[in-house]
Structures are given as C-alpha cells and as structure tokens.
Image (cartoon, grey):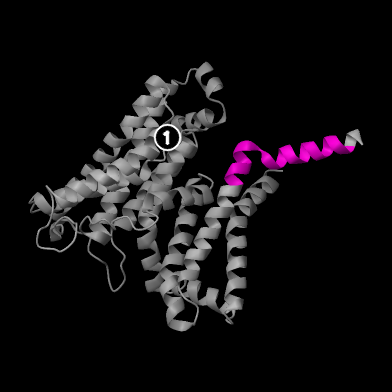
Amino acid sequence: MNKLRISARIFNSLLPVLLAFFIGGMIILFLKENPFRVYGIMMGKSLFSIRGFLDTLHYASPLVLTGFAIAVTFKANIFNMGVEGQMLLGGFFAGVIGAFLPVANPVLHKLLCILTGMSFGVLFAMIPAALKACFRVDEMVVTLTLNYAMAKLLEYLASGPFCDKSIGFVGTPIIANSAMFLRLGPSRFTVFAFLALTVFLILWFVMSRTTLGYEIHALGSNSVFAEAVGIRTRRKILILMALSGALAGMAGAGNMLSEQYRYTLAFSGSPGLGWDGMLIALLGRHSPVGILIAAILYAALKTGADKINMYTSVPKEIVTVIQGLIILFLAIRFINERFGIWEHIKRRKTGRMETA
C-alpha cells in the first residue's frame, strides 16, 4: 500500500512536467523539428556532459535554497510569499559588505557576506511573522505587498547611497575578489554549490528526523490539534519564518558572490529566484529530496536552452514556454489539492446518479 502511495505521489509530481514537455513537443513538431532530438540535445548538454552538469548545479544552488525557504513555511500552512524580497535584501547587503568592507582573509570575507545576507533575510521575514503571530494578519497579503516595497527601496539605495557612479546604469560597485566564489575549471561551478548541498542535508535531517520536522507537519495538517497537544504555534510561526528568511537571504548572498558580483535591477532575473523557488517547492511537493531534484531539472532547462539554438532551428524561448506550462499545471494541481475541486465534482456527479 505504501509503495502504491509513493508511486502515486511520484506520478503526480511528474505529471505537470510530462504534460508541459508533451505540449512543447507539439510546438516543436509544428516548427518541423524532431522533439526527441531537441529534448535529447537540451538534456544531454545540461545533464549528461561534465561541464553542462556543473553549470546546471551552479544555477540550481540558489533555487534549492529558495525552494526550501518556501517549503518550510508552506508545509506548516504558513504562506511566506516574500521570499523574493528577502532574497533581494540579503543579496544586496551581502554585496555591500563584499564591496565596501575591506577584509584581507577571503574565507572570513565570504562568511561575513553570507551571514549578513542571512541576517537581513531574517529581519525582513520578521515583519510579517510578528504581524501573523501577534495580530493574526494574513501573511500572504503582507509578504506580497512588501516584495514590491523592498524592490523600490533597493532601487533607491542602488541609485543613491550605494551607487557605483562609474557605470551608466543603476547598480552597486563590484564586490572585492576576496568576497567572490571563484569558478572551478571552465564551468560556472563554485564552492557555493557545496554550501547549498550542505543545507539540503541539514534540512533533510531536520524535516525527517527531528521534533521540529514533526511539528511542521502537525501545523500543516491541523493547527488547532497542534496547539491542543502543546505545540506553541506563535513561537513556531516566528521560528519558521526566521528560517525561511535566512534561507532566502543565503540564496541572495550566494547569487551575489558566485554569479552577479554587484546588485543591479536585473539581479534576480525574471520572474526571479524567489518566484522560481515557489515553483521548485510545488514541483518537489515540499520534500527536501523532491526540491533538490526539481531544482536540478529546472536549472537543466536553463542550461540547455542556449544549446538548442546552436544545434537546431528551434528558438530557445521554447524553454520559457515549457516553464510557463509547468507553472500552469502546478497551479491547477495546487488549487485542486487545497480546495478539493475534483473530489467535489465527483461527489456531485455521484449524488446526481443516485438521485436519478
């Protein structure tokens, strides 16, 4: 029975991806290319070549962290939609420390940048956490609103007090060499990927082997029952939001030190690492192993996109279409799981048949 349940969960996780690739394959056929060849090139160059796989791990590293930042709260039925803002704030001030604070020791400099990013992520996450824990304010509304406020605040800081006046666009100075995670070999792979993997191992242990993991599951299943058995829900809300903010801040700091090297208006990309983390968490069903696999798969699409242009006539925008389709099917699944729409339809059909 457990094997059947696990198989069903795996199939439900893969279904949005399979449907997206199927529709993407129809579009590729319309462009008079072989979908199997195109997908083979895309995955072969991003997962089955050494350089491509290392590049994929590089792009997956911040996604693993933002995916976890979403999962630790969503699993407890706390909807922290502010991961993007927390990640931006952490990345920005990690860049400030990296650029303006002279530290001779490279290890110490990187550590200070990472800790600064995590600290600012936590501080930003504490605003909606305190409002929810103390006044029961809807954290989804607050975090969504604060994301845009934070983006505007950082735009002001990057064009004013921390602006690099030597460049012709809004941005901060490049971080010092001592703060950079240097690339290992010809790929984009850096030591930051090992940090992300370490966080994965720690969170896997916490979620599956500790009391906190049980309490997260209990809060998500039934918060009233969790409070009845002695779980202090207000305290847990603060702890989980702080953990989520720290992970988001670490993702921003890692992206700053290993990829961007300065804060610009395009620091997080479009739709943004925080929003991508939500997709990763939903695709991985808030499971640590699932999130790791989903992040690698999602990063493989990004790594393989450029290769499609080189070897086929299919534009690399097909990857954006596939990503959008995955988001669409995940949204449908999430709404169905949250509100039981499919079960409600089946019950109504059964009731009509019995009445007839």
Q: Using the image as rendered, state which of residue 7 and residue 139 is in the foreground.
A: 139
Provide the residue span drawn in magenta: 333-353
Q: Which one is nearer the viewer's eye here, 162 or 110?
A: 162
Residue 310 horizontal side relative to residue 6, left or right:
left
Residue 218 % position (x, y): 53, 28
| Quadrant of residue 127 within the rendered picture | top left
Quarter of the image with the C terminus is top right
Say which residue label 1 marks.
141
Residue lying at 9% horizontally and 58% vertically, measured from the top left: 165
Please tell me whether residue 72 belongs to the stretch shown in magenta: no
User: Which residue is depicted at the point 84% across and 34% down?
Assistant: 351
Horizontal side of 65 relative to 287 (left or right) equals left
Q: Position of residue 302 (x, y in %)?
A: 42, 66
Residue 352: horizontal and vertical position, in percent? 85, 37
Label 1 environment density (alpha carbons within 10 Å; few <14, some 14–19, many ≥20): some
> Residue at horizontal 27%, vertical 61%?
259
Location of residue 16 (image quadrant): bottom right
Q: Amino acid at mark 1?
A: Val
Count of numbered marks: 1
Residue 139 lies, with reference to residue 117, above or below; the image says above
- Please indicate, yes or no, whether residue 13 appears anywhere in the rendered image: yes
Q: Nearer the viewer, residue 301 or 52?
A: 301
Q: Main secondary structure of the magenta part?
A: helix
From the top left corner, tell me how far across and down residue 80 is, in percent.
Answer: 41, 37
In the rendered view, would you say 134 is above or below 147?
above
**Callout 1: SS:** helix
Residue 284 seen anywhere in this rendered image of the structure = no
The verdict on residue 347 being magenta is yes
